[in-house]
Image: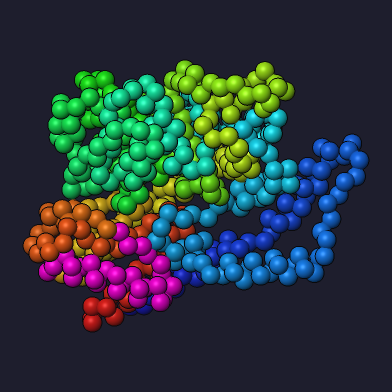
Amino acid sequence: MAKQKTDAGHKRRESKSKSRTRSYVFEKDSLGILRSALIELEKGFSNLPSAADQIKNRARFEETILKVADRLKDNYPYFHPLYAGQMLKPPHQIARIAYMLAMWINPNNHALDGGRASSAMEKEAVAEIAGMFGWENHVGHLAGGGTMANLEALWIAGQLKPGKKIVASEQAHYTHSRISGVLGLDFEPVECDHGGKMDIDALKKILTAVDVGTVVATIGTTATGSVDPLPQLLDLREQYGFRLHADAAYGGYFVLADNLRPVTKSSFDRLSEVDSIVVDPHKHGLQPYGCGCVIFRDPAVARFYKHDSPYTYFTSKDMHLGEISLECSRAGASAVGLWATQKFLPPVKGGEFAKSLSAGREAALAMYEKISADRRFVVPFPPELDIVVWAPAARKISEMSRLSREIFDEAAKRNLHLALAELPAGFFDRLPAKIEGDRDTVTCLRSVLMKPEHLVWIDRIWDILDRSSNVVLDM
């Protein structure tokens, strides 16, 4: 009887999942709203003489677009809950529609000449993001993505702390070392602990040996979602006087989540004390690529951006976004999409958007419980955010890595798309079973459960993983 109830519950969840899938995969109802919005937008320019740009050769136009649609079939189903591999979250419907609506004007948010409305919307949207971290006074803007946003943060760091070293953990995004090279800054990685976080003792050794100008705290690594211990870093800043930059490109929005572990929450609770923050709306913020954001706590850093232009700033005495950005031309449509999304789903604690973040974290916890309770797998540590990493149990690291790749391939045959991550073998040192270290790194399976729908689909995801693992492990 218990088995029948379990099966019935699974079928109900699966039915609910399928229903939810039909409601959001390639939804088309919003296209009617887009048409209404275009008609409304057109009214704002009704005093202009007609200059309609009609489609020429409609048949050829349609044929070309259908060819595009056919080519785009050659993609993983990033939008679907069974895609649980990389950090690819579908934009919200309102973000897509607002972005497309702006494309009929194609504003450029470099200067007010190129996008008055979209520039104002960007300032408002960025202020709302700054508000998530408790900042009322700030300076910041959107960027093409986390790489450009972090580049600006490190550029400012280099201006304020010239000639001094930049440090970030070994699990920080590789762009920090690359950006430092581009900017001519001296960069040094800091060892990680067994949980993928910056090792504080290792950092102290560097701080006592060399002059460090900036420490990058990663608030959600892209490999494991690990969060560097910000309270300890802030204590060290008091002692050594370095600048503290938070790369929260992936994890920043979790400041709104209500189900973080206490140790993780302690870092998010003190984000308001760092000097600069990067967060990517195109990750958890439901935006299309590319949409990153960099914010500085001290508005006075804007002085480093000052430049003269002979033609871009003649229509207004108000601040142009190009005066606080290294990028010149930037898509105003990104700002419009973000602004609309944040008006529809305000980024506040307890709101619908915040609950969707908590749902992703709950999904990761549910997945972790299933995997860690299964003797076929080993898990180095529990998830801090919504990323789970694990590997098949084996006597050798090389064997674990081989089995991970085979399970990855087998799951893909059943439409479950995971990811592979190459992690330090030291992450597994604390496991009860002794593993022969014949390699320095372990190829792990990795699941990014960043879609709120993943919580509903966990049983289905586990079922496919279970069957795929049985095939590979001959069970």
Using residue 27 as the reference point, say whether residue 430 is left or right of it: left
Total numbered circles: 0
In the image, taking residue 123 as reference, residue 217 lies left or right, namely: left
Q: Position of residue 338 (x, y in %)?
A: 58, 41
- Position in image of residue 419 (x %, y %): 36, 62
Q: Would you say residue 89 sits in the magenta stretch?
A: no
Q: Nearer the viewer, residue 269 or 337?
A: 337
Q: Nearer the viewer, residue 51 or 295?
A: 51
Q: Quadrant of residue 430?
A: bottom left
Q: Nearer the viewer, residue 34 or 402?
A: 402
431 to 398, vertically: above or below: above
* Place of residue 316 in the rendered image (x, y in percent of width and height, measured from the top left): 70, 21
- Please identify the quarter of the rendering in which residue 26 is found: bottom right
| Residue range (magenta) | 395-421
- Residue 109 shows up from this direction: yes
Q: Is residue 157 left or right of residue 313?
A: left
Residue extending farthest to the right is: 49
Q: Is residue 153 above or below residue 345?
A: above
Residue 8 in view here: no
- Above/below status of 304 relative to 409: above
Residue 179 image point, x, y percent: 38, 39
Seen from the viewer's position, the closer of residues 383 and 365 is 383
Q: Which part of the image, by quadrant, shows the N terminus?
A: bottom left
Instruction: Residue at 29% x, 80% y: name it.
Output: 471
Locate residue 28 relative to residue 221 in the image: left or right.
Answer: right
Residue appearing at x 9%, y 64% in the figure: 436
